[in-house]
Image (cartoon, rainbow, N blue to C red):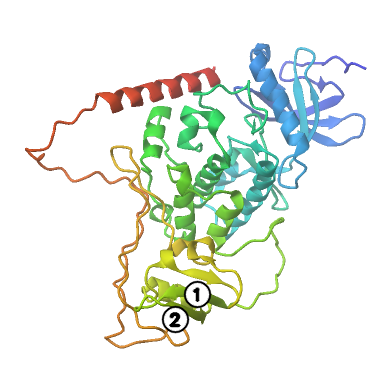
Amino acid sequence: MPPPPDVTSADHPLTLGAYEVLGKIAEGGMGTVYKCRDTRSGQLVAVKVISPGTSRNPVVLQRFEREFTSARVLEHPNVVRAIEYCGTGPNPFLVMEFVDGESIGQMVERAGPMAEDEAVRLIGQVCDGLQRAHKQGLIHRDVKPDNVLVTKAGVAKLTDMGLVKDVEGDTNLTKTGRGLGTPHYMAPEQFRNAKGVDARGDVYSLGATLYCMVTGVVPFANSNPLDCWMKKIRNEFPPPRELNPAVSERVDWAIRRSMSADPANRPSSCREFFEDLTGQSRPSGPVKTGPVAAAADNWYLVYRDENNLPTTVKGTTPSIRDALKNNLLGDANLILVGRSKTGQFVPLGSSPEFRDLVVAPAALGPDGKPSGTPKRPAPVPTPRPTSDPTGEAGDASGRHPRPPAPPSGRYVPAPKGKRDADAPPRDWTTPVLMALVAVLTAVVGYLLLTR
């Protein structure tokens, strides 16, 4: 049975199919979202209506339908639920769960930076919904503060699945070489090829969203798409702690790691990103908000002593972190850690409790080539500890010099000076042409999207 015809007024339609329009929620270039009531059940819903001009574009219509399909298969408390799609008639529309609250973007604009604990709690819920999407082969590609709604009960819900990519079936809607998304929050590789973006692209956007939440500043603000991309590939942004000293060192590190220009230097999943934020291993399943029984805080570390012999020591998380910060255990990249003396041992960087002391965000140099992850200084012979790795020692303890702090993530140009007279002339032709082609491709794709 076809839906009843829409009734319109001067300001907005009075009805959309079987839905009574109560008022306008938001309006954008792609369409308008209305608060409506289902006349059959009385349920409040949000109805997104595609704009008349855009509705004539078949690719946009397919994306609109894709948004419904993607949201419908994602039954998760932290993803806005899709209810119905109507693609017939002059006003195609999508019916979604009505969220009585506001977006994170509106919250930051109204009240400024969020408290770190609250920001991490909300982003953890978004991680849950996004992790489910990734498990089902869906990449969001447009995570940003305006696409996260928070209910009055404090539940975060991810919305706007219009740019979702189906890893298995996205063959027609996204062309290779076209950039889709919101420039300030999307990963740098998405500017050039949105089709090739994987879960680490969404992790970048999560980090950029949290950056805005804890600083109150839009990352790469006041930059056009070209400048935004250039800054992203050079990691040229102030660290969160520089904008808001109340941000902890761990959250600052986790955000900078997630916003690394090279996807290989980011967390590989939303779960890993949230573990970076909390410094705690996280089991599968939704975020636990109630009290959790604390496990025994004992670790066993295997490392090589001054005689290159494998040595096992036992300690707590704080004691081991202190030993690592003071370089008492040699090269951290060679240390294995486990929860039991006979259990499975994994590299130290695999454990969220110690990862921030081993893994650093990779910085990009002015030539656009990765400089790689900073490494710790070569190990100095260390006396073999007898029990606790943080035991105090005298002047002959063999402690390592404290390693330099990881890079802030800001791009610092090389110092100016005279060129070596014997150095060959630099050939800028090839990199300039390659950069020009990439830039033109990104700009054209962006203009097509915003038409």
- Give how far across and how far down residue 282 sits, in percent: 64, 61
Specify the label residue 389 is tagged with.
2
User: Please, is residue 204 above or below residue 439 in the view?
Assistant: below
Specify few, some or many for label 2: CA neighbours under 10 Å numbering under 14, 14-19, or 20 or more.
Answer: many
Which quadrant, please, contains the N terminus? Answer: top right
Identified by mark 1, the residue type is Leu
Quadrant housing residue 67: top right
Residue 139 to residue 331: above or below = above
Name the secondary structure under disc 1.
strand
Q: Is residue 344 visible?
A: yes
Residue 275, position in %: x, y? 57, 59
Kindly indicate the quadrant of the structure image that contains residue 287: bottom right
Q: Position of residue 24 (x, y in %)?
A: 71, 28
Q: Is residue 403 left or right of residue 133?
A: left
| Foreground residue among 395 and 440 | 395
Question: Which quadrant: the C terminus?
Answer: top right
Residues 172 and 156: in front is 172
Callout 2–callout 1 Cβ contact below 8 Å: yes
Q: Residue 181, can we see it?
A: no
Q: Which mark is residue 301?
A: 1
